């Protein structure tokens, strides 16, 4: 017996250590079908979560929600300008703690795709490049340039070295299975020619030479040198093919929505189209697909690029800016991922056979010796069809794909939402703020904190992007005999600026403000101005709104007042002031005094009560508040303000600009048909961004300092702290629509077809308090705007009021007998319901 036990123990230990060694020495490779991990082909579903766009306290929950949503991989860029703010000085703490983020992903049991770049685009300030790089002598960005390659290689080696020392590559037992070098360089290479091709070859060889043991990819790079895999970015990638037959078909950016720009409407992408794009990619042989973004987060501080990229980077992602699931998108994609995973044995074994099912319909069949999976597609954008496949008939809505993991049972259709929809609400908390104000005066020239130079200087060259603000100041002497002093025809001041916003002060009084847009950041101020006899002071406050993040020749980009600056209507005609002596002051007085901090805010006298400044440009406001109870995400409603920046307890939550309302027209959006970033828009005529995320982890229980700098002039009494909660939940379920539950029952040997169910649930701490709408028949509209159609079961409300009110969650079968009978026989019906969470 003892010998048997010893033998059993020996076998156990041998098995344990063998598995441990296997884990530590895991291999990652690829073939024409897929990425292989320990020799096993994998269908990998990935999602982008950028660590600096959320807080470390949010990371575990975001990662867990991603896992619950069916992801295998978390993808992130590496943010060079956050990690090396000055040459050789590195920062990897707080929101930039890359190692901590990756280890949290590993603890959740997920893989990592690390996009080192180090150019990242990402609508991030200067595309992720540190601004100091622009001033390295002789540098040219992203080309066959020695100084640039030296800096790029040094940072890449720094990141790879950190990952190796922490044993974070999969070959070391870590979670990193893929790395990326460069980013969307193909269009730039095409534009710059031979130097670009040489740079591509160098970058690939440099990266591969670092010996990570995992594959490298280049996105939007058709000529990616072997063994680097070229990958696709876009709204659709079903027709993409890698540049070699032995490389897998990979999609590094499936855009789940689009970014918001100040002055633009808010883009969104229907869940049905996003799911359709994924299923279409997989049915065409794709094996790695990443959602960009899965959680977009927030451009805290001055990290937003563009210029004019909004502080919110929500991106209409499956997890919203505040870390909450965006349903139905999150839930619909979760169900899609389950259906795809059921097909994985067949998908990784063979290439698909394509069969026509009609004029705009086809089947992609994956038939191996041991498995069969089919994708039935309807590409028609208007009409539903019934197709025959095998021994069955299947209803296919427009622009949709049904997934059959056994080539017989439809378990999912991309256009049929089984997941509930959620309508969020922003509810004020607390009793309001008690504000104090401090007015920032227009800067004066020739003081200790100014520099005087001949001519107009480019803004970033002076500020090195340490602030958004740069003062340009000069004096104009007006003789008493100037004609305009007598005839009242004020001279015309014209100022040309490379962007992005400009406030013009004449003798300390605001004469006007101009600003550009993402498409046209350059601005021109041209206005008749009041001048008096004697010395007149012209003060120009030039304001940057993020540095560009995409394009060629980063080293040539500029901003600020570059001129000409002219004064027309004088006795001598027109004076060109461009070459005059100009004094420069970097930043605001309030910035120099650190008014956004507890200590700095005590260094000046603040006005309050009846003396509080409102509608006054260049004004600082401060108040204190206590953190609300609970864990609901928080935001500031800034709709009463103009433009500026916000700080909470010394930390910047970003630029605010609610005065910049969204241009364009917004209308209904049909999910069917090819999507682009202009197709589906909301918030037209409203502020591009009204609410600004305040991370809970930045708050103390009481006495939190809130500071707002306002450029245009606003009314701080309209600012409120709000919490983001679920308002109503909806289900919109068709009779007979495919359901994953059917597959589960078949697996258990129960072959009877199950009727679909409407599932409703409120978040923890909330319950269903009221049924706002319910209709079984042919209801119209969408969640939040349902209405009865021509056919309606009059007992539609009864089942939900009985089963759901007072509960956190409930399920109701979509069947005529549940609602008192069939209200319209021989008519295809559905159930729409909306319930209030309280």
Image (cartoon, grey):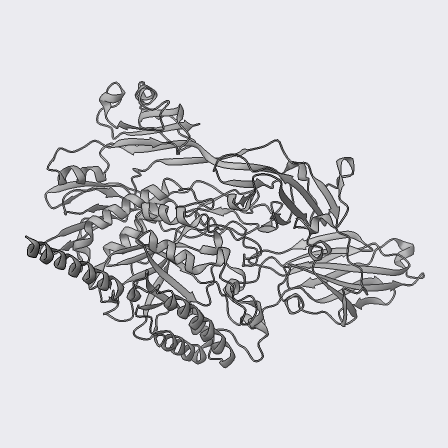
| Up-down relation of residue 198 to residue 571 (above or below) | below
In x, y percent, where is residue 701? 56, 39
| Up-down relation of residue 611 to residue 569 (above or below) | above
Measuring 41% from the left and 59% from the top, which residue is drawn there?
76
Residue 42 in sight: yes
Measuring 16% from the left and 61% from the top, which residue is drawn there?
14
Q: Residue furthest right?
A: 481
| Up-down relation of residue 175 to residue 722 (above or below) | below
Q: Residue furthest front?
A: 2
Residue in the foreground of this view, choosing between 382 and 809 = 809
In x, y percent, where is residue 111? 32, 57
In x, y percent, where is residue 142? 48, 73
- Of the 4 image quadrants, the one containing the C terminus is top left
Measuring 55% from the left and 63% from the top, which residue is drawn there?
548
Residue in the foreground of this view, choosing between 795 and 495 = 795
Q: Residue 798 is drawn in which quadrant?
A: top left
Residue in the foreground of this view, choosing between 343 and 720 = 720
């Amino acid at each position: 017996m003892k010998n048997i036990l010893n033998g059993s123990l020996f076998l156990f230990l041998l098995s344990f250590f063998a598995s441990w060694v296997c884990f530590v020495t895991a291999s990652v490779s690829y073939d024409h079908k897929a990425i292989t991990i320990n020799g096993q082909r994998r269908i990998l579903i990935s999602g982008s979560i950028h660590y600096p766009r959320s807080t470390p306290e949010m990371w575990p929950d975001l990662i867990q929600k991603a896992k619950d949503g069916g992801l295998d991989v978390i993808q992130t860029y590496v943010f060079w300008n956050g990690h090396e703010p000055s040459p050789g000085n590195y920062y990897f703490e707080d929101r930039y703690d890359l190692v901590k983020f990756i280890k949290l992903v590993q603890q959740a049991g997920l893989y990592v795709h690390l996009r080192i770049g180090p150019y990242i685009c990402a609508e991030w300030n200067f595309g992720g490049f540190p601004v100091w790089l622009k001033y390295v002598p002789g540098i040219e960005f992203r080309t066959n340039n020695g100084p640039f390659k030296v800096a790029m290689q040094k940072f890449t080696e720094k990141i790879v070295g950190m990952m190796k020392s922490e044993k974070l590559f999969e070959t070391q037992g870590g979670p990193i299975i893929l790395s990326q070098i460069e980013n969307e360089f193909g269009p730039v290479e095409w534009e710059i020619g031979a130097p670009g091709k040489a740079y591509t070859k160098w970058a690939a060889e440099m990266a591969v030479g670092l010996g990570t043991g995992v594959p490298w990819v280049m996105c939007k790079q058709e000529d990616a040198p072997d063994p680097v895999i070229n990958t696709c970015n876009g709204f659709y990638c079903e027709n993409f093919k890698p540049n070699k037959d032995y490389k897998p078909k990979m999609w590094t950016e499936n855009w789940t929505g689009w970014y918001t720009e100040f002055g633009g409407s808010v883009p969104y992408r229907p869940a049905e189209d996003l799911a359709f794009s994924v299923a279409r990619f997989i049915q065409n042989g794709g094996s790695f697909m990443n959602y960009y973004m899965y959680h977009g987060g927030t451009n805290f501080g001055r990290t937003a690029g563009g210029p004019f990229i909004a502080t919110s980077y929500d991106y209409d992602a499956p997890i919203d800016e505040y870390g909450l699931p965006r349903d139905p998108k999150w839930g619909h994609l979760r169900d899609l991922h389950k259906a795809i995973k059921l097909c994985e044995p067949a998908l990784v074994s063979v290439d698909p056979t394509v069969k026509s099912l009609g004029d705009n319909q086809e089947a992609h069949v994956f038939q191996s010796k041991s498995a069969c999976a089919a994708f039935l597609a309807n590409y028609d954008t208007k009409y539903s069809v019934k197709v025959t496949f095998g021994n069955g008939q299947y209803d296919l809505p427009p622009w949709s794909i049904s997934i059959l993991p056994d080539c017989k049972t439809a378990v999912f259709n991309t256009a049929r939402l089984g997941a509930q929809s959620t309508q969020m609400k922003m509810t004020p908390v607390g009793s309001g703020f008690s504000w104090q104000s401090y007015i920032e005066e227009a800067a004066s020239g020739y003081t200790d904190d100014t520099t005087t130079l001949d001519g107009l200087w480019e803004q970033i060259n002076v500020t090195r992007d340490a602030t958004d603000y740069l003062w340009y100041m000069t004096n104009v002497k007006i003789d008493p005999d100037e004609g305009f002093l007598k005839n009242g025809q004020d001279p015309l001041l014209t100022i040309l600026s490379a962007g992005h916003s400009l406030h013009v002060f004449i003798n300390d009084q605001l004469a006007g403000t101009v600003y550009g847009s993402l498409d046209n950041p350059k601005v021109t101020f041209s206005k008749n101005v009041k001048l008096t006899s004697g010395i007149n002071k012209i003060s120009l406050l030039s304001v940057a709104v993020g540095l560009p993040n995409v394009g060629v020749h980063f080293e040539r980009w500029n901003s600020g007042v570059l001129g000409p600056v002219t004064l027309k209507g004088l006795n001598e005609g027109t004076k060109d002031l461009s070459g005059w002596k100009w004094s420069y002051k970097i930043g605001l007085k309030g910035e120099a005094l650190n008014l956004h901090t507890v200590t700095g805010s005590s260094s000046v006298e603040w006005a309050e009560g009846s003396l509080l400044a409102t509608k006054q440009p260049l004004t600082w406001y401060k108040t204190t508040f206590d953190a609300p109870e609970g864990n609901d995400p928080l935001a500031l409603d800034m709709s009463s303000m103009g433009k500026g920046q916000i700080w909470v307890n010394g930390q910047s939550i970003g630029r605010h600009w609610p005065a910049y309302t969204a241009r364009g027209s917004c209308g209904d959006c049909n999910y069917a048909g090819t999507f682009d970033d202009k197709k589906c828009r909301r918030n037209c005529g409203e502020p591009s961004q009204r609410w600004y995320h305040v991370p809970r982890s930045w708050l103390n229980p009481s006495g939190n300092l809130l500071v707002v700098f306002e450029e245009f002039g606003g009314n701080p009494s309209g600012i409120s702290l709000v919490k983001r909660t679920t308002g109503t939940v909806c289900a919109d379920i068709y009779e007979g629509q495919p359901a994953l539950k059917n597959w589960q029952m078949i697996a258990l040997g129960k072959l009877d077809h199950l009727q679909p169910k409407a599932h409703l649930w409120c978040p923890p701490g909330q319950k269903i308090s009221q049924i706002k709408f319910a209709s079984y028949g042919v209801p119209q509209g969408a969640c939040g705007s349902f209405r009865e159609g021509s056919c309606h079961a009059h007992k539609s409300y009864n089942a939900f009021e009985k089963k759901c009110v007072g509960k956190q969650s409930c399920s109701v079968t979509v069947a005529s007998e549940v609602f008192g009978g069939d209200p319209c026989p021989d008519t295809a019906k559905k159930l729409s319901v909306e319930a209030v969470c309280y």
